[in-house]
Structure formats: structure tokens, C-alpha cells
């Protein structure tokens, strides 16, 4: 679902454990790390898209997490030209995302990267709150920074 400006609606997921470490996932057969994220399906709201992506990408359901917060506004990033593509005859220039901060409420053994027929990730790790900005691909750094600045204070509540 690409809007008039060329941005695909998307959710980003920042999952923390009881030590306030953040889940980073390694893209399948790549040396690239990121937070789970994914696009909306028709008629989905941000929360339902987040729960679907949470299950598809890391195998967790509603019972495994609690929502600590979400960004108030859409956060956007532009894709480099080499990653821009047409979907339904519309050029996708980038993503606009609502970010969620979640707390894992079950055991980390519940994390399962193989729930999808085509897994997005092949490894994961818990990381400090500063590590994501060191590891994420450059064109996503600003959105990660904005999401972390807005959401990390909610860990203290």
C-alpha cells in the first residue's frame, strides 16, 4: 500500500527484554541487522499490522508481549534509488512507519524466526540501546534515531 507521495505504510517493532536490551535481527543470508518491520495489508490498522508482523517475523503473539508505547506520528525514510521499485504501478520511494515499543513477557525461547514460509531473518541478539544505530543500514539511521528518542523514555515508566 503506497500513498500518493510514494511511501509504503509500515510498522517498526522495538522489542525489549527485562534488562531493557533490544532485539536486533540479522537479515536472512546477509550481514545486515535491523529491528523487525513490515508493511500493512489492506484494512489493517497499525496495531493489527504490528501483531501480524511480530508473529510472521519472530514468532511471537499477543500473549508474549506487552505494548509500552508507539510513535505519535509517521516516521519516514527514503530508499536509495537502487532499492526503489514499482508496486501496483506506483513507485515506492520509501517507507512511512509507526513504531511500537514492546516488552517480552514470556521466555526468549518463544522467539522463532521460522514461522514464515520465507523467513526474513536467520539470527537475532539482544543489544544495548545504542547498538542499533551502529548496526542498521545508513538510510534507516535517522528513523531509528527518531523512534528510539521518542520511545526509549517509556522504558522507565
Image (tube, rainbow, N blue to C red):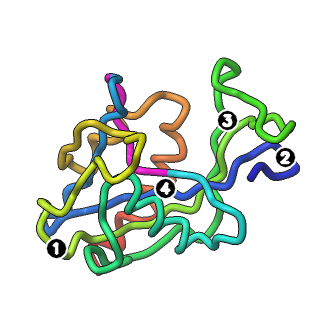
Viewer-nearest of discs 3 and 4: 4
In primary-sequence order, the first of circles 1 and 2 is 2
- Residue 83 is left or right of residue 25, and the answer is right
* Numbered marks: total: 4
Q: Residue placed at 74% from the left, 53% from the top?
A: 1
Report if the CB atoms under discs 1 and 4 are less than 8 Å apart.
no
Check disc 1: other Cα within 10 Å, few if <14, some if 14-19, many if 20+: some
Residue situated in front as seen by the camera: 9 or 59: 59
The span from disc 3 to disc 1 (Cα, nearest Å) is 35 Å
The span from disc 3 to disc 2 (Cα, nearest Å) is 11 Å
In primary-sequence order, the first of circles 1 and 4 is 4
Q: Residue placed at 37% from the left, 77% from the top?
A: 68
Q: Residue placed at 64% from the left, 25% from the top?
A: 83
Q: What mark, if any, has residue 12 been given in the picture?
A: 4
- Residue 38 is left or right of residue 18, and the answer is right
Residue occupied by mark 2: 5
Residue 24 in the image: above or below residue 31: below
Check disc 2: other Cα within 10 Å, few if <14, some if 14-19, many if 20+: few
The span from disc 1 to disc 4 (Cα, nearest Å) is 20 Å
Q: Which residues are magenta?
A: 31-37
- Residue 14 is left or right of residue 74, and the answer is left
Viewer-nearest of discs 1 and 2: 1
- Which quarter of the figure has residue 11? bottom right
Report if the CB atoms under discs 2 and 4 are less than 8 Å apart.
no
- Of helix, strand and loop, which one carries label 3? strand
In primary-sequence order, the first of circles 2 and 4 is 2
- Which quarter of the figure has residue 43? bottom right
Q: What mark, if any, has residue 78 been given in the picture?
A: 3
Residue occupied by mark 1: 106
Amino acid at each position: 500500500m503506497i500513498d500518493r507521495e510514494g511511501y509504503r505504510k509500515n510498522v517498526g517493532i522495538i522489542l525489549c527484554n527485562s534488562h531493557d536490551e533490544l532485539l536486533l535481527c540479522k537479515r536472512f543470508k546477509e550481514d545486515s541487522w535491523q529491528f523487525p518491520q513490515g508493511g500493512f495489508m489492506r484494512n489493517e490498522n497499525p496495531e493489527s499490522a504490528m501483531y501480524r508482523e511480530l508473529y510472521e517475523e519472530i514468532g511471537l503473539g499477543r500473549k508474549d508481549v506487552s505494548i509500552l508505547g508507539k510513535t505519535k506520528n509517521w516516521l519516514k525514510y527514503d530508499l536509495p534509488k537502487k532499492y526503489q521499485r514499482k508496486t501496483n504501478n506506483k513507485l515506492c520511494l520509501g517507507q512511512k512507519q509507526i513504531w511500537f515499543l514492546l516488552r517480552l513477557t514470556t521466555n526468549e525461547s518463544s522467539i522463532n524466526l521460522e514461522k514464515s514460509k520465507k523467513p526474513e531473518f536467520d539470527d537475532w541478539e539482544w543489544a544495548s540501546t545504542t547498538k542499533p544505530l551502529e548496526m542498521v543500514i545508513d538510510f534507516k539511521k535517522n528513523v531509528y534515531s527518531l523512534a528510539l528518542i521518542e520511545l526509549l523514555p517509556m522504558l522507565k515508566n
